[in-house]
Amino acid sequence: MVFMFGEDLPVATNRVTLDPDVTDSSGLPAAHVDYELHPNDVALAEYGIEKIFEATRAVGAVETNDTGVLYPPPGWHLMGTCRMGNTPDDSVLNKWCQTWDLPNLFVVDGSTLTTGAAVNPTSTIGALSQRTGEYILRNHDHIAAQRTTPSNADAPTM
């Protein structure tokens, strides 16, 4: 079995929100995912499928089948929705994964990364978690006293 992996382009309407009607077992609003493929994503997948067929025919495959472009995909890493950056104008988080809007809120998951480069981002997320945890540990008192999130240049160092 061969599977084609590609990179999704950002789509402004793709987002995770709180569902106004559905709640979880604790009565809290459940997550609601709005997700649609960009036309380039479909073209990329179709191209990849054709290249897979070319490779399988080249090695003598006698039967090939495909599912076409799966929508929704069977699994994906949602990324880029809380991206790190230099200012509130270009990002949601500073370089330490601290939100610009709420100084005591840190976000470390796939949303901090703008791209996955077609590989599983788990190791990178783990490394960012370690780095962010160390930052919080070393700068707890300073962070607790903040009223606004400092710019990257003004943030405490490790």
Image (cartoon, grey):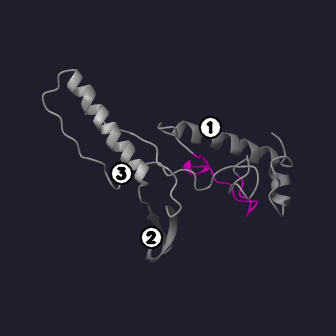
Of marks 3 and 2, the one in the foreground = 3
Dot 2 surroundings within 10 Å: few (below 14), some, or many (20 or more)?
Answer: few
**Bounds of the magenta segment:** 98-114
Q: Amino acid at mark 3?
A: Pro
Residue projecting furthest to the left: 62
Cα–Cα gap, marks 3 and 2: 24 Å
Question: In the picture shown, does residue 15 fall above or below 83?
Answer: below
Residue under the image location 31 percent in, 32 percent down: 51
Q: Position of residue 17 (x, y in %)?
A: 52, 68
Dot 1 surroundings within 10 Å: few (below 14), some, or many (20 or more)?
Answer: few
The residue indicated by pointer 1 is 127
Label whose residue precedes the other's in the sequence (3 or 2): 2
Cα–Cα gap, marks 3 and 1: 26 Å
Q: Amino acid at mark 2?
A: Asp
Cα–Cα gap, marks 2 and 1: 30 Å
Question: In the picture shown, does residue 47 fall above or below 145?
Answer: above
Left or right of residue 65, residue 131 in this image = right
Tag shown at residue 24:
2
Q: Position of residue 91 (x, y in %)?
A: 69, 55
> Which residue is more in the foreground, 97 or 89?
89
The residue indicated by pointer 3 is 73
Please say whether residue 82 is one of the residues in the magenta stretch: no
Q: Amino acid at mark 1?
A: Ala
Question: In the picture shown, does residue 86 fall above or below 117?
Answer: below
Residue projecting furthest to the top: 59
Please say whether residue 101 is one of the residues in the magenta stretch: yes
Of marks 3 and 1, the one in the foreground = 3
Secondary structure mostly seen in the magenta stretch? loop
- For the residue labelled by badge 1, is the local secondary structure a helix, a strand or a loop? helix
Q: Position of residue 69 (x, y in %)?
A: 31, 48
**Mark 3 in CB contact with mark 1 (< 8 angstroms):** no
